Image: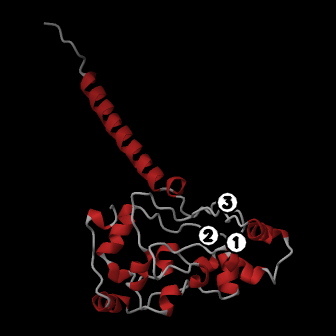
C-alpha cells in the first residue's frame, strides 16, 4: 500500500497544532486585557458633565467636607447628590454671574434638577449600601480615590465583582478609624496597618461576607 502522507506531514501537523494553541491563547489574553482595560471599565476616564464641577477646587482648595454635598452617605444606601439649593447656598453670592455656573442658576429658576452623569454606576442587579461601609470603617477614598486631586471625577477602581470580593475577604487592608479619617480624601494608611487593621475589624464587628446574596438580592 502506498504511503498516504509524506514524512514532513508530522512536522506540518505539529507546527499547525502549536499555531492553533498559540492563536487561541493570544485571543483569550487580548480579550482578557480588553475586558479589564479602561475602554470597558471606564477607569481613568472622566465622563462629560452638565457642569465642569471640580472636586479639587471645592474639596482641596475650599475645604468642603464630603457630607456637605453627599448628605445621606452615613445613613442611607446611596450617598446622594447635592440639590441645586445646596449649590446656590454659595453661588448665589460668589461666581453668581459667570457662564460656568449658569446651569445652576437655570436649574434654580426652572426647578428642574441638574442631570449629572454617574461616574460610579453599578448595575441594577448589584446592591451596595454606603452607610454600612462608612460605619464599618471604610473611607471614601478606598473606593473613589483621592477626589481632592480631581478637576473632574473619574473612576480609579474597576468596581468589578472580583475587586469587591477581594476587599470583603481582606477588610483589614483598607479599614480605618471612624470619624475624620473616613472622609479624609488624601488619607494614607499608617505603617502599622497590618497590626491596626485586624484590631479595627474586631472592634467594629466587620464580617467577611462573600455569599452571593450579600450583593445580589
Residue appearing at x 43%, y 57% in the figure: 124
- Which is nearer the eye, 118 or 201? 118
Q: Are marks 1 and 2 in contact (CB under 8 Å)?
A: yes
Residue found at x 27% / y 69%: 210
Assign a secondary structure to mark 1: loop
Reading the chain from its start, which is encountered first: label 2 or label 3? 3
Q: Badge 3, how many Cα within 10 Å: few under 14, some, many 20+?
A: few
Q: Which residue is mark 1?
A: 53
Residue tagged 2: 153
Q: Taking 148 as reference, is 22 left or right? A: left
Quarter in which the N terminus is drawn: top left
The residue carrying pointer 2 sits among few (fewer than 14), some (14 to 19) or many (20 or more) residues within 10 Å by Cα, namely many
3D distance between C-alphas at marks 3 and 1: 10 Å
* Alpha-carbon span between mark 1 and mark 2: 8 Å
| Percent coordinates x, y for residue 37 in the rendering | 49, 56
Colour setting? secondary structure
Please state the total of marks drawn on the protein image.
3
**Rendered position, 52 above or below 137:** above
CB contact under 8 Å: marks 2 and 3: no
Q: Nearer the viewer, mark 1 or mark 2?
A: 1
Amino acid at each position: 500500500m502506498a504511503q498516504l502522507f509524506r514524512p514532513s506531514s508530522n512536522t506540518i501537523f505539529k507546527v499547525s497544532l502549536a499555531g492553533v494553541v498559540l492563536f487561541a491563547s493570544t485571543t483569550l489574553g487580548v480579550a482578557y486585557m480588553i475586558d479589564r482595560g479602561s475602554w470597558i471599565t471606564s477607569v481613568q476616564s472622566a465622563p462629560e458633565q452638565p457642569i465642569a464641577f471640580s472636586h479639587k477646587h471645592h474639596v482641596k482648595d475650599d475645604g468642603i467636607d464630603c457630607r456637605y454635598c453627599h448628605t445621606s452617605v452615613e445613613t442611607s444606601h446611596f450617598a446622594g447628590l447635592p440639590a441645586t439649593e445646596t449649590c446656590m447656598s454659595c453661588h448665589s453670592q460668589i461666581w453668581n454671574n459667570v457662564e460656568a455656573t449658569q446651569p445652576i442658576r437655570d436649574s434654580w429658576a426652572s426647578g428642574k434638577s441638574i442631570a449629572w452623569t454617574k461616574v460610579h454606576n453599578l448595575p441594577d442587579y448589584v446592591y451596595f449600601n454606603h452607610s454600612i461601609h462608612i460605619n464599618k470603617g471604610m473611607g471614601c477614598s478606598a473606593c473613589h480615590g483621592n477626589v481632592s486631586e480631581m478637576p473632574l471625577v473619574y473612576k480609579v477602581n474597576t468596581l468589578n465583582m472580583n475587586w469587591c470580593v477581594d476587599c470583603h475577604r481582606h477588610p483589614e487592608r483598607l479599614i480605618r478609624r471612624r470619624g475624620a479619617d473616613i472622609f479624609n480624601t488624601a488619607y494614607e494608611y499608617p505603617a502599622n496597618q497590618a497590626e491596626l487593621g485586624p484590631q479595627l475589624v474586631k472592634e467594629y464587628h466587620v464580617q467577611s461576607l462573600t455569599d452571593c446574596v450579600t450583593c445580589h438580592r
